[in-house]
Image (cartoon, coloured by chain):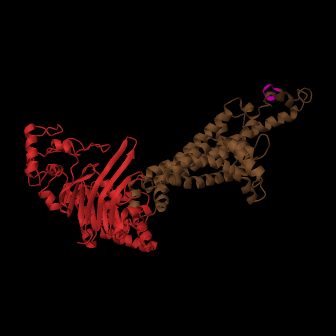
Amino acid sequence: MRQLILQRLALLILVMFAVTIATFASINLSDTPLKNFIAAGAELDTNGHCDAIRAGEMDDTQQLGQNVGDCEYIDRIKAENNLDDDIFTRYGSWLGDIASGDLGTSTTSRLEVSSILKDRLPITIRLVVMTQIIAIGVAVPWGLAAAYRANRGFDRVSTFASFGLLSIPNFALAVILLYIFGIRLQWFPTRYSNNGWYDELKSLFIPAITLGVGLSATYQRLLRTDLITTLQDDFVHMARAKGMPDRHIMYRHALRPSMFSLVTVFGVNTGALLGGTLVIETIFSIPGVGRELVEAVIRTDPPVVMAFVAVIAAGFVIINFLVDLLYGWLDPRVRSS
Amino acid sequence: MADPQLSVRDLTVRFPTTRGTVQAVNGVSFELEQGQMLGIVGESGSGKSVTAKTLMNLLPRTAEIEGSVMFDGQDVRQAAADGRDHFWGVEMTMVFQDPMTSLNPVKKCGEQIAETIRYHLGQSKSEALAMAEDLLGQVGIPEPGKRVSQYPHELSGGLRQRVVIAMALACQPKLLIADEPTTAVDVTVQRHILNLLDSLREERGMSMILITHDLGVARGRCDDVAVMYAGRIVERSATETLFGDSRHPYTDALLRSIPRIDQPSHTRLDPIPGRPPELINPPVQCAYAPRCRYAQPDCLKSIPEAQGVEGMHEFACHHPANTDQGREALAANVAAGRNASGMPVAGYAGTGGF
């Protein structure tokens, strides 16, 4: 087991490294360094206007309005992001900064990226955790009940229902739930609010249900299929021959060996949710990671984009590392190999 | 004579499938006295495991079951219908063929034994674990204290089968059904396991049904043997009678297909030609007739009823072996070179038989 962990850890570091290269490259190789960082104002500099203004050869107010301010801005962005260096040096210093916890400064809002992240990430994490708790909480009893009498009444109906849930796009479900529970019944707020933890929990409830319901259908399908296979195993017959009650057999014997697919997909989905709750965050005005990331892309804010992508990727990799450890908990044979 | 401990009457099990109804067990009847050991012998698909699983209430819900199964004055099928607690595992229990798969891979051995004790006997966890350790010692596992906290994959096949046996015996069952308990273990371990089962049975006055495809396994240990073919019991008698004076041609053929230690080496064995019949919509004839050296035209017209001495030596055959009638039928077939359904018949190669 120790060897397995070390192996996975080494792989994790390698993957993280590759992810930072990909992130950095995708932002920095698309155009000239300056244009990548300042979409609108870069013209000034490239046309030599700023040099002229700096040298006093050009009257700053004459032709281009607030040229001096723009040129100062350009100089600052250049200096902050070492844009005059070659790309390898820049990657190296970016990686070094990130590793030491300095995620840079937003080019538009002038806020520290780490403080933006500190605001946004916990909200998304809370949403993801709630979503997964709901999804697993629904899927496990549901899968057990469906597999217990596979292909009979309840299972048939639940197969139908799960495909129904899977095929509803989550923005549609969000609107429906919002209408019923937010507007009609007024049980839950219709948008994110944060006056204390209970208030926040309540405002995240409909978003979490929206995301969790579709996931629970996926999880239920996986668990049901694996359970049906496990229930054919000799040790299940043996447990019945010992006279153990059905409930005990389902929960204590069949469930754990049937959770591999579920746990795998659970890990992948947790990672995907970290950056992928954008639509829901937008509908419910949740200031989460996904929304900030998309907004940063639109307003051309490379330090924010790079840091967020790197953090999401790190989260993804770490969660899947934990899932690998979970396999060991599920099956002692993995532990000893 | 008191009622036998276990009495199975006209047990019929059918499985509806998309291809038709499978007649897995067809009018099987047998009794078992307390403390006795019954061997059920037959090849794959003969219905021996389905019979056992019917007793254990392990058949899928789709199975159609008829007939009666009485155990110690209790109606087993009624108990199954009522979902009775503390019956299976306490009154009767079962050991399966493959020790590699009949233990839960994710639970410690001790825990798997202890959970039975905790559920049926209501012991505390630590008491149950202590009893589990004790049981492991009784089935001859060295260092039982260590095994309790080991996982099944850390044990060898032979040890695992012992754990399974300990598990089955945890609540002192009155009847143990062993379904090919030695088929999946090493030949050298086979005898140890069988001897262990035998001695445990004797110590506890437990009854046992030993299911096997190996007549040799049944011979030394069983009081009675029932031979099954295509869902029916074709012959049933005391073990010595069966081995010394078999009546059904199938039993006879089985005996001739087993190598014997007292024969010179390189003695040819007589295999049984052909394959067992399909159990979907079987024709109304003796199921063994197509492979039978004795088969006559009347074997293809009706299913033979059980005859002989009831409860002593019963067999279902129109032309029983080791009788004048059978010898005539065999001689006629050898002379014709074929049996009634066209299978070639020649004289025996080996000296054959036990």
Q: Is residue B246 visible?
A: yes
Of A145 and B236, nearer the camera is B236
Residue at x-position 49% and y-position 61% = A247
Of B13 and A80, nearer the camera is B13
In this rendering, is residue B152 above or below A157?
below
Image quadrant in which you'd find residue B101: bottom left
Residue A282 image offset from top left, x and y in percent = 74, 43
Q: Which chain, by letter, is brown?
A: A
Q: Identify the hue of chain B.
A: red
Q: For this view, does B153 lie left or right of residue B208? A: right
Residue B91 image offset from top left, x and y in percent = 35, 68
| Residue B313 covered by magenta stretch | no
Of B27 and A310, nearer the camera is B27
Residue A73 image offset from top left, x and y in percent = 82, 37
Image quadrant in which you'd find residue B162: bottom left
Residue at x-position 90% and y-position 26% = A63
Q: For this view, does B310 lie left or right of residue A37? A: left
Q: Which residues are magenta?
A: A44-48
In this rendering, is residue B105 above or below A271?
below
What kind of secondary structure does the magenta stretch mostly adopt?
helix
Tag count:
0
Residue A329 image offset from top left, x and y in percent = 49, 57
Residue at x-position 83% and y-position 27% = A49
Q: Is residue A8 visible?
A: no
